[in-house]
């Protein structure tokens, strides 16, 4: 069965059938839509997506590359992107780069070769090879959550520096702590364009504004809770345990809370702990985790719209920055 057969049975044009199937771009009267849907059901018609993709040089797919979907923040972001894409009649292909350049390039080539409608990239400082791959395909790529220097393209980001600065200032001023230590990233973390780096920058600014030194108060840790837990065991059992620890991700903070419990350190009585991202688990930790949140659904919708639409030419349209909000809970000492 073809689209012509559906149009003939419904008593309408093939263009109207197309509008019903694709939910646009032009509106269709309710009675006409019902006739078309009834004809589709009676004939058992199914659109040939492969033929459509060959004709338009684009599929109804969106590619999404994340560093590690096992981490709650990226899992929640991927779900939000999938929901936003579904609202627009698109499906999402997800690839995990595992923070490795070669895997990122692999998925870039694979997804772009599938002629996706657009590609959303969450990258920890993509290599020059990745940037060259994007240029070679002349593809519409949206950078989400991070805006590395290696690629100058459309981006949807947060005010990461401002959020970390607000959080550190809250710990210092609201709770009168002598200083706040920071659990940052690793040596491999890019020096700019990476949210973890921006969180450290915000912490440094708040410490400097309070006249406090950062020397010896920044500690390295991977972004996940398991490695952060092991590092926190050593840090918190040492002779110079900090009075407060701002973690650059919630996953790190969850690992710190576990280590503190194991060492029988009272949080927040003896140690204030805060994170960044406001993953859903942050409200369920013991004590509930103070963190920095954002509107991930709005960010996902913006990224999908940019991926499948016209990003525009002006710099204000190419970079969309979303605000952040402090989520004050008990782990910092607030009631």
Image: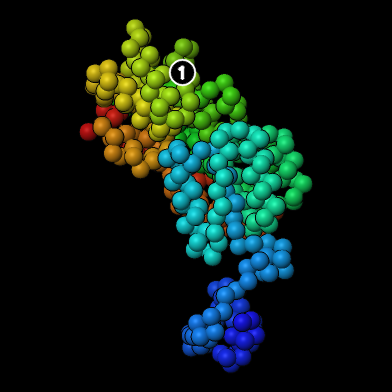
Crowd around label 1: few <14 · some 14–19 · many ≥20 (10 Å): some
Which colour style is shown?
rainbow
Residue 283 pos. (x, y %):
30, 39
- Identify whether 240 is placed above or below 119: above
SS state under label 1: strand
Residue at coordinates 57% horizontally, 45% vertically from top-left?
Answer: 95
Residue 301 pos. (x, y %):
51, 55
In the picture, which quadrant includes the C terminus? top left
> Can the viewer see residue 316?
no
* Residue lying furthest right: 136
Residue at coordinates 41% horizontally, 24% vertically from top-left?
Answer: 228
In the picture, which quadrant includes the N terminus? bottom right
Q: Which residue is mark 1?
A: 219
Residue 314 pos. (x, y %):
68, 52
- Image position of 28 (left or right of 148): left
Residue at coordinates 46% horizontally, 12% vertically from top-left?
Answer: 216
Residue 292 pos. (x, y %):
40, 37
Q: Quadrant of residue 73?
A: top left
* Residue lying furthest top: 239
- Image position of 62 (left or right of 227): right
- Image position of 280 (left or right of 187): left
Residue at coordinates 32% horizontally, 26% vertically from top-left?
Answer: 257
| Closest to the observer, 50 or 207 | 50
> Can the viewer see residue 191?
yes
- Image position of 74 (left or right of 261): right
- Identify whether 317 is placed above or below 42: above
């Amino acid at each position: 069965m073809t689209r012509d057969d559906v149009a003939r049975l419904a008593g309408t044009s093939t263009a109207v059938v197309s509008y019903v199937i694709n939910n646009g771009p032009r509106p269709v009267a309710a009675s006409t839509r019902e006739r078309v849907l009834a004809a589709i059901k009676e004939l058992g018609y199914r659109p040939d997506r492969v033929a459509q993709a060959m004709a338009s040089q684009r599929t109804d797919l969106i590619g999404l590359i994340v560093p590690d979907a096992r981490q709650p923040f990226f899992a929640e972001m991927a779900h939000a992107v999938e929901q936003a894409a579904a609202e627009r009649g698109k499906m999402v292909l997800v690839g995990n780069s595992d923070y490795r350049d070669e895997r990122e390039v692999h998925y870039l080539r694979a997804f772009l070769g599938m002629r996706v409608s657009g590609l959303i990239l969450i990258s920890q400082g993509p290599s020059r090879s990745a940037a060259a791959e994007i240029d070679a395909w002349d593809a519409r790529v949206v950078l989400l959550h991070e805006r590395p220097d290696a690629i100058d393209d459309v981006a949807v980001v947060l005010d990461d520096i401002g959020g970390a600065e607000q959080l550190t200032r809250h710990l210092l001023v609201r709770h009168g702590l002598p200083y706040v230590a920071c659990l940052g990233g690793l040596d491999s973390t890019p020096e700019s364009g990476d949210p973890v780096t921006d969180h450290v920058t915000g912490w440094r600014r708040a410490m400097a504004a309070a006249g406090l030194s950062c020397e010896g108060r920044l500690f390295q840790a991977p972004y996940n809770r398991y490695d952060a837990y092991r590092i926190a065991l050593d840090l918190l059992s040492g002779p110079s345990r900090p009075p407060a620890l701002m973690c650059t991700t919630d996953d790190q903070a969850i690992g710190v809370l576990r280590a503190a419990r194991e060492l029988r350190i009272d949080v927040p009585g003896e140690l204030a702990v805060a994170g960044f991202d406001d993953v859903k688990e942050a409200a369920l930790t013991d004590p509930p985790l103070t963190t920095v949140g954002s509107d991930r659904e709005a960010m996902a919708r913006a990224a999908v719209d940019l991926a499948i639409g016209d990003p525009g030419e002006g710099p204000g349209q190419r970079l969309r920055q979303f605000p952040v909000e402090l989520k004050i809970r008990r782990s910092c000492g607030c009631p």
